[in-house]
Image (tube, rainbow, N blue to C red):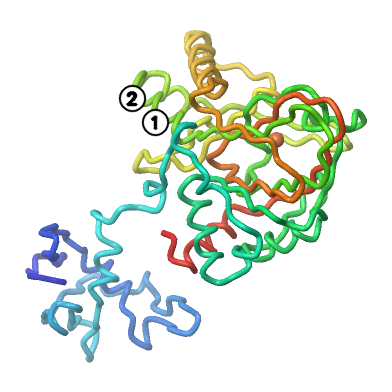
Amino acid sequence: MIKNIKILSNELNILFDNEKEDKFPNIWLRDHARDDTSWDSRSHQRKVFTAKIDNNLYIKKAEISDQGNSLTILWSDMDKPIKYSYNFLIENSYNYKSETTKCKPWIKNEIDNKIFINFDKVNSKDGFKSFLKKLYDFGFCVVTNCKTDISSVETIANKIGYVRQSIFGGLWSFESDKNMADSAYTQDELRPHTDSTYSNDAPGLQLLLCCEYEANGGESIMVDGFKIAETIKKENKEFFDILSKIEVIGQYKGDGVYLKAQRPVFRLNSDKEILQVSFNNYDRAPFRFKNDLTLKFYESIKKFDLLANSTEYQWRHILKPGELLIFNNWRILHGRGSFKGKRKISGCYINKEDFDSSCRIYNIF
Ligand SMILES: [Fe+2]
C-alpha cells in the first residue's frame, strides 16, 4: 500500500506501508508512464521518446487511488493523468531486494534428500516449478529415474530453454577419451571448477546424465561458490577484494580453437552483490599484473581453492544410471572423483539468461 505522497521539486516522495520511503525523480516517473502514447502494453516496449521529455516537466496534481494500491499523476506535458501501481513502484524502490541475494548458500551438511526430484515430477507443471526452485535455491539438483539416453537431457533442457551450442557440440556424450584436449575426459580426479572461464558468456546450467556406470569411484562433487564468497568476505576482506577485482584470464587452446576471456573470480554488480563465480585452475592462462599484488593474489586463490577442496564444502554423490545432475555454472563449482572402470555421461549446456527467464516466468524470483 501507498500510505502517503509529497510533491517535491523534481521528485515525488512516496511513503510505503512498510514505512520505507523513496523519492522518485519526475523524469523517471514520466519515462515510465504506462499510457497508450508512452507504452506498448502488447510488446512491453517503451514508445515515449525519452530524450524529448520536457526539461521543465512538473507534477500538476498527484493523488493516491484504489485504497493505496495505485497513484495517479497529472503531468505538465499531458492531458490525462497517468496511473502507477503500488507493485510497480515498490518493485522499483531502492529498498526492493534484488534477484541475486535470495538464494541459499550452503555447506555440505545443509544438503539432504530434498535435492533429488523424479523425472516425471519435473515434467508436470507444479513439479517443474519446484524443480526450478530447488535449482535456484541450492544451485543444483538431481533428477532421478530418467531414461538412460540422451533424449532425457534434451527433454529437460527444452523445458528450461534450449540446448546451447559450444565447442563440444550441443548435446554430447563422453567416456574417458585421451584424444580430447579437455581435462574432463580423463579418469583422474577433477578438482572443483566452473566451466568455460574462457568464454565471455559462460554457460548458465550444465546437465550431466549418467547413462552407464560400471566403475569404482567417480563421485560427482558440488561446491557452492557463493558460500565460499560469503566465507572469504567474512574472514578476509582483502582476499575478497582481490578476488573481486583482478581479472583472471581463462583459455581453451586445442581442437582447432583458441578461446580467451577474463573476469574476476567473484564478479559483483554495482551494489557489490555477487553475480558470478568463475574459477578454473586448469584453464587459467599465463598473465601478469602488478608485482605487489601477485603474492596476495596467490594467497587469495589458495584460500579459495582450499575451501573448495575441503570436505565441509563438498557435496559428493556417485551418479547412478538414470540420474541427471543439473547445476548453475555461474555459482556452483563441480568436480569428479577419480575412477576406474566404465562411465558414460551425456549432457549439455543451457544459457544463464534462459534459466533466469524460466525462473521469472515461474515467479521463482
Ligand atoms: Fe567441467
Give the labeled residue for mark 1.
230
Q: Is residue 101 left or right of residue 306?
A: left
Q: Is residue 20 left or right of residue 286?
A: left
* Kind of residue sitting beneath label 2: Lys
Identity of the residue drawn at 61% across and 16% down: 288
2 and 1 marks in contact (CB < 8 Å): yes
Tell me the SS state at disc 1: helix
Q: Quadrant of residue 332?
A: top right
Categorize mark 1 by other alpha carbons within 10 Å: few (<14), some (14-19), many (20+).
few
- Residue 6 percent across, percent down from the top left: 7, 69
Tell me the SS state at disc 2: helix
Q: Is mark 2 within 8 Å of ligand 1?
A: no
Identity of the residue drawn at 11% across and 80% down: 63
* Kind of residue sitting beneath label 1: Glu
Q: Which mark is residue 158?
A: none
Q: Quadrant of the N terminus?
A: bottom left
Q: Quadrant of residue 175?
A: top right
Give the farthest residue toward the bottom: 79
Viewer-proximal residue, 290 or 183?
A: 183
Q: Is residue 276 above or below residue 316?
A: below
Q: Is residue 58 above or below residue 271?
A: below
**How much space separates mark 2 and mark 1, taking CA atoms?**
6 Å
Give the labeled residue for mark 2.
234
Q: Quadrant of the C terminus?
A: bottom left
